[in-house]
Image: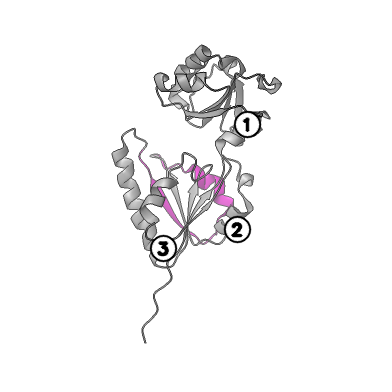
Amino acid sequence: MTTPLPSIGTLHLVGVGPGDPELLTLKAVRLLGTTPVVAYPTTGDGAALALEIARQHLNPGATHVGIALPMAVERGPAQAAYDTVAADILTHLRAGRDVAYLCEGDPLFYGSAMYLVARIGPEAPIAVVPGITSLTAAAAAIARPLAARNELLKILPAPLSDDELRPELEAAPAAAIIKVGRHFDRIRALLGETGHAANAVVVEHATSAKQRITRLADFAHDERPYFSTILCYRGAEAWGSPT
C-alpha cells in the first residue's frame, strides 16, 4: 500500500502592521498562533522588524526561516536572494506545511511579498492577510486626515528624482512621502518649492515605542531613519494645519 503524498501547504502573506504588536488583525493573530513555519526578512546585521512586531503572537513551536535580503540599490542580489528564499519555502509547502511570511505594514503596499507571489504562486496556493500601512498609521499618529472630500492624495517614494516628484507634488493638494531616509534634506527643499512644507509633518517609527512626530519646519535631527513618512498638505481644508 502506497503512502499518500501530503497536500501542498499554503503560503500566507501576513501584514503585521507598522510597529505596535496590538495592531495586527484578528485573522493575522489566529493564523500566526497555529502556523508551523514562519518566514521573515532580516537586514545585514540580523535585525528583523517584522518578527519583533509579531513575536508575541507566534506559535511557540514554529520553525523560523530568517531571510537575509541585501540592502542594495542594484536589483540583482535581491532577486537572487528571493530565488533562494522561494526554494526554501517551497520545500516546506511541498511537505504539507503552511508557511506564514511576515510583512511589515501591508504585504502588497510597497512590500517585498510581491517577489514571492511571482515565484511561488504557480506552484502553491497563496493567501494574503492585509495589514495596517505606515501611511495610515502616520495619519492616526497626528490625528489628521490624509485627504478630504474630492482631494487627490499622492503617495510618492522619496528615492524618485526631483524632476519626477515635482510635477506630482504640483498637481496634488495632499501628499505622503515614503522611504524618506537619506533623501530628507532634498525632499524638504522640494516641498518648500511646491508649497507643501508649511503644513508638513514628519512621523518617524509610527505606532512603535520609538515614534516621534515633528513639524517639518522644526525638524533638525541629524538622524535620517528609513522608517519615516512625511505627510504634507496644500489644500483648502482647515485640518491641514500642522500638529
Disc 3 residue crowd, few under 14, some 14–19, many 20+, Cα 10 Å: many
Q: Amino acid at mark 2?
A: Arg
Give the number of the disc on residue 197.
none
Q: Quadrant of the C terminus?
A: top right
Q: Residue furthest top?
A: 193
Give the number of the disc on residue 93.
3
**Residue stretch in magenta:** 45-70
In this orientation, which residue lies closer to the viewer: 123 or 140?
123
Residue ID at (48%, 44%): 108
Residue ID at (33%, 42%): 78
Q: Which residue is mark 2?
A: 30
* Image position of 94 (left or right of 201): left
Q: Earlier in the sequence, mark 3 or mark 2?
A: 2
Q: Are marks 2 and 1 in contact (CB under 8 Å)?
A: no
Q: CA distance from mark 2 to mark 1?
A: 27 Å
Q: CA distance from mark 1 to mark 3?
A: 38 Å
Q: Amino acid at mark 1?
A: Ala
**Residue 148 percent coordinates (x, y):** 65, 28
Residue ID at (32%, 50%): 83
Give the number of the disc on residue 139.
1
Q: Is residue 135 visible?
A: yes
Q: Quadrant of the N terminus?
A: bottom left
Q: Residue furthest front?
A: 150
Quarter of the rendering containing residue 2 = bottom left
Q: Earlier in the sequence, mark 1 or mark 3?
A: 3
Q: Is residue 209 visible?
A: no
**Residue 50 percent coordinates (x, y):** 51, 45
